[in-house]
Amino acid sequence: MHSTTLPRPPRSTANPAPARVAGSVRRTTSIDVSWPDGVEGQRLFIGAARDLWTPVAGEDGLTLAEARFEVRMTEDKAITAITAEPAPEGLQRLVGARAGGHLRMLLREVMPDLAARAHPLYLVLDDLSGTALVSAFAWSQWYPDWAERLRQRLGEEQHAQLMAQRVNVCWGLQEGNSGVQPGGVPKDVASADAGDVRNPLDPQGWHELSDRDGAGFRRARRIDVTRDEAAGVIRIDSAFQDSATRPEGGRVAIHEYNLRAVADIATLEVLSIEPEARILPFSECPGAIHNTQRLVGRNLGEIREEVLAQLRGPEGCTHLNDALRALADVPELAARIAS
């Protein structure tokens, strides 16, 4: 099916975040990417995360955990330097690793305690791979001819190889779809205003973000968790957004999902999942939502593994999968409310 027969992709942000509700735990994470040494220099990744408990709506919350890191990374996604607070044992073993599936496996190997405790540092480090994959998108907002510049820098052969590798990596880039046509990527892949995740009516609702001048990229996520003891369920309201700065100010988003889910308090069985595509680059992308129902009936604590098993490659959306995988930390967040 040609893209001209499909509706336009969704391009409307849900920002800002809703105000926190009483009795909830909110996890917020962000990774901001910049190029201090110019477009061909190494990227600087600044990650931050916080878990905030809100006993009473409208009042200050209590910080349960927080984390921060800085990473330097080459253009081919190799980590050259890393610092973090807290600084877990084994952190420096990440130097030399390349962002991607291997890095995620290495994280679980060298930081099993962080993973087991669902510490926010683990989640934001896990997000390095997805952020590294998408962050160069920021330059397309600063150079209208960015795609051609990239082609010239790589050379025709390497550029063609790069484009070929994208085919069937996800639902939206399946062979024949609009994003993988021989003529190249469509020009209008991002036009939606990203808004601001921060709600002026709830100034404590987000941790401090790293706002910088110049070309920059941000991955931001929010996970709100409440326990409904009367119904015997955990309720989840989450959001995920990838955005970039604009020369004229503000931000443009390329990916944004809202995601609601319900799980059984006692068994952690996933009872319902409701993804909402808010901003996506291609008309075909929202179709990935339907396959998420395969996760209903699965165990929430094992959802990282289930996403990889059920929604791999063209069966899912890379960015929706990232939003889903993060829900594996919800049981630990819900337990903190109970305690």
Image: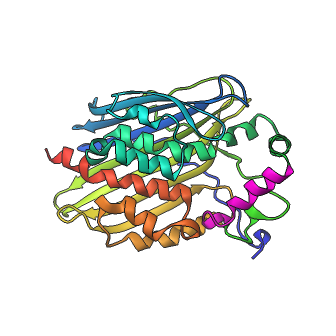
Q: Position of residue 315 (x, y in %)?
A: 54, 70
Predominant SS along the magenta part: helix
Q: Which quadrant of the view contains residue 246?
A: top right
Q: How is the image coloured?
A: rainbow
Left or right: residue 90 versus residue 131 is: left
Q: Which quadrant of the view contains residue 80?
A: top right
Residue 7 in view of the camera: yes
* Residue 54 vs residue 48, the one in the foreground: 48
Left or right: residue 234 versus residue 165 is: left
Inspect the magenta stretch and tell me whether residue 197 lies in it. no
Q: Position of residue 235 (x, y in %)?
A: 30, 57
Circle count = 0
Q: Position of residue 163 (x, y in %)?
A: 75, 57
Instruction: Locate the C terminus and report the quarter of the image it occupies.
Output: top left
Residue farthest to the bottom?
Answer: 1
Instruction: Locate the N terminus and report the quarter of the image it occupies.
Output: bottom right
Inspect the magenta stretch and tell me whether residue 170 lies in it. yes
* Residue 21 vs residue 291, the one in the foreground: 291
* Residue 308 vs residue 157, the one in the foreground: 157
State the residue at coordinates (65%, 53%).
11
Left or right: residue 267 versus residue 104 is: left
State the residue at coordinates (26%, 58%).
234
Above or below, comparing residue 108 to residue 180 in the picture: above
Above or below, comparing residue 119 to residue 179 in the picture: above
Above or below, comparing residue 23 to residue 165 in the picture: above
The boundaries of the magenta stretch are 156-173
Q: Position of residue 142 (x, y in %)?
A: 76, 34
Residue 202 in view of the camera: no
